[in-house]
Every structure is written in structure tokens, then in C-alpha cells.
Image (spheres, rainbow, N blue to C red):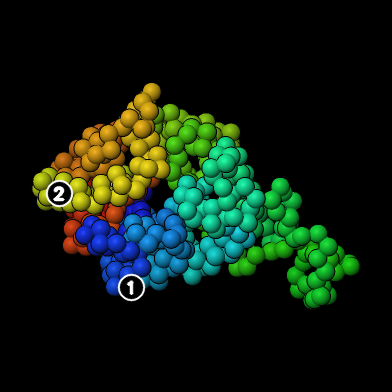
Amino acid sequence: MDVGVFYLPSIGNKAEISAGMAGRRTDLYQRMLSDLAEQARYLDQHGYYGVAFTEHHFHIEGEEVSTNPIMLDMFIGMQTSRLRVGQLGLVLPCHNPIRIAEDIAILDQATKGRAFAGFARGYQPRWVNTLGQHYKGLADNQTDPEGYEKLKKELYEEHFEIIMKAWTNPTFSHHGKHWQIPPPGVFWGAHEVTRKYGRGVDDKGLLQEIGTVPETYQKPHPPLFQPFSFSESSVRWAAQHNVVPITIVCDKEICTGQFKACQDGAAQFGKKLGFGQGIGITREMVVADTDEEALAIARESGCFIWTKFFEPFGFNAALARPGENYKDVPNTFEAMCERGLTICGSPDTVSRKLERLFKDLPAEYFWVYLYNELVPQKAAMRTLELLTTKVLPRFSDKIR
């Protein structure tokens, strides 16, 4: 099993966020960068798969200050030598897919093959609608919510197709619903040079194909992930496209259905997977020397964000049981622990919980969901130390 660490990342502790506008404070941002770097250097030394950052914009409140995960990846990549760096994930409907292909290729080259890529559809209209407003229908999620979701799915899948073409072909063209690459009738003044040293123009100097540079360091491209998969159809699509779905769902029965959907999707792709192969799980983790200390830390960290910020967006669906309306799930720290989203305690307590989890759901990838800054740096480093020395070696021979 590969183990990675997934950061939001948060900026400021509970008191600093509660004071207001923490996301705009340079002192807190600099502290966050310093703390992330220290954690990443530790992970780099101890066999972790990689670190991942989410993508969110305009988070003046301070809870997810990850405006450009690729730049954060580069920051971490330049301070480590083995650790992979990537995104969980970039919201494709809002992006220019060619720029994404180029930027991740540069990251992959700069880190000599340590990049991975994660793609998502997006769920926060404050920034999805703002940054994606040039796509007709993406600026308004209220008038036609069904059409809004349909458009995001269309854009996600077309952008994914374009990125794959860019990474796996020296030059390419694309003719889809939302993109024409290159646009028809573009005259290229340097066509003689391109015919001599490149390709992609016809004898009249009109562009027929383009090629992105640089190519990715890894061939055919960096590893691919898709967070966070809730529906079996989403899991199946990911597996069909050689993408590793990451689930945050906690219920054993529902998650088992996702694992089987991953196998089914991979089989349609022509790939046979065992139960748990090609899929990942994420859980919030806090480990301390005693159960009481870990509970106190966790209550003031992930719970503070989850119950106030994630719940309004429907994320308690991750805690729901079969047939249960996610709106009826108690929005409490106790529910997060009881239903398995938050795993906290002493090394022995956490090990027993993970043993039960992995016995039922032997995922190939496990992502530790860490609320940096909300978990103070000393406690975060202690969590990583205890995970590394006392917990994770029981489940992964890669952690050392």
C-alpha cells in the first residue's frame, strides 16, 4: 500500500481563523509554507508516496488557501528528492486544458518524474462560477442546476481528453463540443520553419495540429487520480480511463460497491484488478501519545472546518449509511469519529481502527487527510512521527 498526505491546506489555527480574514495574512501564509516544508522533508525521508494539494480560490476565511496547487507542488518538489507532488485535484471545468497539460509537464520535468495529476469537477460556485464564467452556463448554478452539473461533466471529460492527447502525442488536433484545436483557418507565418523543424502545418501554411512543450518526464504521462468519488458511475469512469479514484465515503457497504465498480471499470479498459487495486481511501488522521490528547487536538482541527464549511456543501454524504439522507447525519465531531471519517487516538488505538478498515477495504492507496495549521505544527509532526514509527509499518512495507 502506498501512503500519501493530502493537505487542504488551511492557514491559521482555530483562534486565528475565528478572528477573521486569515487567508489574507502574510504572516500566517509564511508560517504555513514553513510548516509544510518541514513536514514534506520528513515524509521524503520515510517512504511516503507523495503530498497532494486541493485547488480552491478566494478563501479569505483561511480554511483552504490552495489557489494554485501546482505552484505549491513545485515549492515542495524543490525541497525534496523522492516524494511525489501533485493535486487532489485541479478543477478541470474552470481551466484551459492546454495550460494544465503544459504546467504539469513542467512540474514533472523539474522534479524528474515525481509529479502526479488529480482532476475534479468542482463544487464551490463562489469560484467555479467566477473563473469558469466564459463557458456559457457555468456562471449560474441556480437557474438550471441540472444543466450546470451536466456542463461541468462535459467540460471535465473533454478537458481530460485534450490533456491526454497533449501528453501522448508529439502534435495533435481536437474537434469537440467546446474546443477546436487548432481553430480553423489559422495561418502560421513561420510555416516553412515548422515544416523543416517541426510539423502541424499544411502546404498553404495553415495550422492543422499543435504540440505542447515540454513533454512529460514520465511516459506516457504522470499517474492520474480523481478525488473524491461518491457515485459508482464516477468510480467506473475513472477506472475506465486508467485514473485512480479516491473515495472519502466511510460506510463499508457503500465503499465495497465503489471498489467493485472500480474493478468493473478497469475490466472495460482491458485491465484486471483485484479487490482494492487501483483505488484509494482518504481519512483524517490525528495521532498522539494518548487517546485523550489526540481527541482534544482533532476536535479543534478537522471538526472545526468540516462542520462549518464542508457540511453546507453536502459533504456529510461521506458519512451517510445506505438509505440514509445525508442531511440527517449528525453534524458533530462524535459522528465524524463514530462513522470513521476521523481516525484519532494513540498509536495502538489508531492501529486497531486501521486494521479493521483495511481488512474490509484493502485499498492500494491511503491518503492521510491532514488539516495543517489547525493541527499545530508540533502536534502535526508528532502525528507523522507516530504514524511512521508505530502505525503505518504494520500496513505498508514502504514506510520506513
Residue at the farthest top position:
323
Q: Position of residue 91 (x, y in %)?
A: 51, 53
The amino acid on which the numbered mark 2 sits, given as a three-letter code, is Ala
Quadrant location of the N terminus in the rendered image:
top left
Identify which residue, 20 or 38, lies in the foreground. 20
Residue 296 numbered mark, or none: 2
Q: Quadrant of residue 210?
A: bottom right
Residue occupying the point 20% across, 45% down: 344
Residue occupying the point 58% across, 39% down: 144
The residue pinned by badge 1 equals: 26
Q: Is residue 226 above or below residue 11?
A: above
Q: Secondary structure at mark 1?
A: helix
Identify which residue, 51 or 299, lies in the foreground. 299
Q: Position of residue 264 (x, y in %)?
A: 52, 31
Distance of label 2 from label 1 (alpha carbons): 28 Å
Q: Residues within 10 Å of mark 1 (few under 14, many from 20)?
A: few
Q: Position of residue 179 (x, y in %)?
A: 70, 53
